[in-house]
Amino acid sequence: MPRPGKLASLLPLLAVAALAGITYWLLQATLPPAQQAPAPEKRHTPDYFANNFSVSELDATGTTQYRLTAKSMVHYEDDEISELTLPAMRMFQPMKPTVTATAQRGTVNGDVSIVDLYDDARIVRAAGYGDPQMQADSQHFRVLVNDDVIETEKPVRLQRGPSVMTASGMNYNNVTRVMKLFGNVRGAIAATDINGGSSK
């Protein structure tokens, strides 16, 4: 059993230790929470690849609405953009000719709602249902998948049957089959298109 004198000498030490513990606890309680380390910044580097790439969208009945294929695909992590080699986009509408868009290269965004086609880009609407084949050539076409619209701000050459037109830009609605040409529009319209031919 410690002597009274020794116990008395220990009391200041115990008091100081208790005070230090309380002070430390109060300091920790009042400090702001530790900041989490920021997430590493994404870089424009490929994070996955694919050869013979193919993706399709189906409607509620299971019918294919469009199909996007490419010889190769490279996906980038920072902007979710995929670069395509030899892309081909096919759009299907019930009771209407198939529309196919091709190019030497292209890009597609993360949710596959915008497909850009570059270099020797071509749009072909097959003949059928009273319409002749239609072909459009340009160095760039943008396919707005959700709107079923194809457009370009580049010079375009359009051939519909024997009729040939050139323009500074184009907008084609695949649902209504309405083609709009912009800018310097020139060409020759065949007599069959003037005299009772379909304008769609």
Image (tube, rainbow, N blue to C red):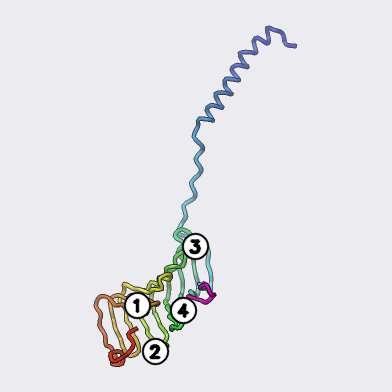
At label 1, counting other C-alpha atoms closer than 10 Å, the crowd grade (few under 14, some 14-19, many 20 or more) is many
Residue tagged 2: 130
Q: What kind of residue is marked 3?
A: Pro
* Distance (Cα) linking label 3 and label 2: 46 Å
How packed mark 3 is, by other alpha carbons closer than 10 Å (few <14, some 14-19, many 20 or more), is some
Instruction: Residue 160: name its quadrant.
Output: bottom left
Quarter of the image with the N terminus is top right
Mark 2 or 4, nearer chain start: 4
Q: Disc 2 residue type? A: Gly
- What number is the disc on residue 138? 1
Amino acid on which disc 4 is placed: Phe
Residue at the outermost right position:
1
* SS label for mark 3: strand
Q: How far from the left and from the top, in percent, is residue 68?
A: 48, 74
Q: Which mark is residue 46?
A: 3
**3 vs 4, front mark:** 4
Query: Which comes before the other along the chain, label 3 or label 2?
Result: 3
Q: Name, please, the residue furthest toward the front.
A: 61
How far, Cα to Cα, is label 1 from label 2? 26 Å
Please tell me which residue lies in front, 63 or 157: 63
Cα gap from disc 2 to disc 4, whole angstroms: 17 Å
> Residue beneath label 4, please?
92
**Which of pointers 4 and 1 indicates the residue nearer the eye?**
4
User: Do callouts 2 and 4 mark residues in contact (Cβ within 8 Å)?
Assistant: no
